Image (tube, rainbow, N blue to C red):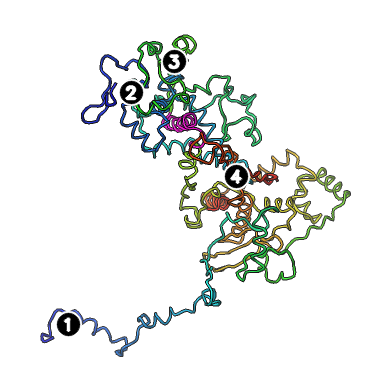
Amino acid sequence: MGAFEGIDKLGRYQPPTESCRHDHIPSPHPEAAVHSPKLAALHARLSLPERLPLQTLARSLVDVSADSDPAFNNSSLAILGSDILGYYTSEFLLCHYPRLPMVVLFAAQSAYVGPKTLAALSQEWGVEAAACPGGEVDPGLLQFTQVDPGAPPPDMLKPGTTSRPNDDRHYRRGLSSRIVYDDQFGDMKANPDSGIAITGSSTSFPSSPSRSQPTFPPPSSSLSSTLTSHRPNLGPDRQPTASRTTAYAPPPSRNGTTHERARQTFVRALCGALYLHCGKPYTRSFFRAHILSRSLRPSTPSPATSSLPSSSAPQGLASLFAFTQPTRDLSRLCAREGFEPPVARLISETGRASRHPVFVVGVYSGRDKLGEGAGSSLDEARFRAAANALRGWYLYTPGEGEVSMPSETEIGAGGGNGRERGGGKKYIPPFIDPGEVVV
Amino acid sequence: MTCPFSPLSLARQPFFKSSGFSSRTCRRQESTARRLRQRLRIKPEPSFAETIPTQDHIIYNPPSSAPSVYHTPFKFLPQNDKRRQRLAAATTSSPFAFSAPTSDNSTSSTLPPPLRAPVQKRYHLTSADFDEIRRLRIEDPLKWSNIALAKKFQCSTVLIPMICSVPKEVKQIREKELEDIKQKWGPKKRAAREDRARRRERWGRDE
């Protein structure tokens, strides 16, 4: 099989001829991945290592709504990738910001690896979606079935299908129960026993068993020749035929998914595939380069009710805080930590009798200034000062050399090659905080 | 210019005619370059003055700005944090001393004035007072509200709900009263109140 088979003289992808047409299969054949310029371009654009084969990259682009066969869609990779992304993010947040309250932690997790972020990420990577999935589609396109207009969104959970006990009784969803029962973002997740969690929305294809009929030689390009043991079940020649006809029975529902959901699943599946093929160190560096490098920006405030210019809006994790009674919380915090009770002091002011006065108020505990805030009224400045003091408390981060995340200390985590031994960072126990302020 | 009716002179004519109100003498304008240059000749900041000309040193003169919340205040640093010792050493040795991490109260006059007079907690209520508060509340819950009880016993309004709660019926009556008041508000007052609440929310988000 030539390397340029399936590509015409102008470099365009040509669907296979009648001898091996794939119209009857729901997603592109793994063999077609080698011939797709789109896929090769995506592989090169992301600087993915050669150890990640194009076939796996193509598989990570196939959503469960396009191909319900778990051996050919990305659902299993996405589960692994979701756990990896969640682990690396929470590890980073907990080690670098050990005092973050739980609500902010959930929000930060969602901001770094939440559905919206991952969907935006795949869009920035230049991943395009196929209009309709099918075996004849270019494997470099994201393949998923759009949810029908008017149908309930696929991530909407009905009572009785979530992982919470007695969720049909509408109990209050407190924060403690969100930690125990809900997912990494504090959102309700589907009950794994109800059968929704893994496969999500599935599409049944009546021609599913016929896909195992044609036999193809194993891919012989230079990319795929390097991988042997790392490779999960990929080629059809490795698939047990019996399991596809008998054991796996796709559910009869024909549910689609949303664009955002399909994109998010792709990014997760890619991370899972990277973990399987390239190991932990590469996955960590990929995570650092693509996720941690993103800056957290607040949504632009509407100018109608804004009293301060938008340039003063907080950046980073500080934008995730929303206090309702910061003065009370701060006095509780000072009482808990044994500091002197906070006192608001007027540092400077201008234009008290004018239409636009500005007051600068600092909150002091004893002789130490805890926070400072400016506002157009004394009350506002005091409120802002107390809120800033609380942000200062919660956003404490140990010094640069004082943090070592557990994944950094693993053997082989230092170098780029996962097989090399040693090089793990020295383990420093992370700072453990007594917890957020409870009033 | 030889021609008296040149376009330039015609154009200038109205200017000279209307200048009867102002003096004809040449007046020096405030905006001359020399004046401006003199005005802008400000003495440099003291930190830029060459105090130690013989050796290299760092000039630290940041522009005035709101402090970043990512700089943890000295008091909020944990006991084993290395920045504690460094900050303490910097404030004692360096001339550029920022927030004083000392905890002596000798120089309290240098602190800015407090917004409100500091309230000293008195802890003056006894258990007999507590019983009296409960008795009054049971006797007439409508009359003895939290504010009224706090005023009578000279304590905080936060303390009263810790001692005794308000009956459900009284709560409903109060809510009904408040709703009746809100019903009388016009659209302007209602919008102003809503805007105020929205602005207050933005304070908490630091926007």
Among the two numbered marks 3 and 4 on one chain, the one whose residue lies closer to the N terminus = 3
**Residue A85 coordinates in the image, percent (x, y):** 52, 35
Residues B174 and A12: in front is: A12
Question: Which image quadrant for residue A350?
Answer: bottom right
Residue A404 disc label: 4
Instruction: State the residue position of label 3.
Output: A239
How crowded pointer 2 is (Cα within 10 Å; few <14, some 14-19, many 20+) is rated as many
Instruction: State the residue position of label 1.
Output: B9
* The residue stretch that appears in magenta: A258-282
Q: Is residue A108 magenta?
A: no
Q: Is mark 4 on a helix, strand or loop?
A: loop
* Mark 4 or 1: the one toward you: 4
Residues A89 and A404: in front is: A404
**Residue B12 coordinates in the image, percent (x, y):** 20, 81
Q: What element carries label 1?
A: helix
Residues A423 and A14: in front is: A423
- Could you tell me which quadrant the N terminus of chain B lies in? bottom left
Q: Is mark 2 on a helix, strand or loop?
A: helix
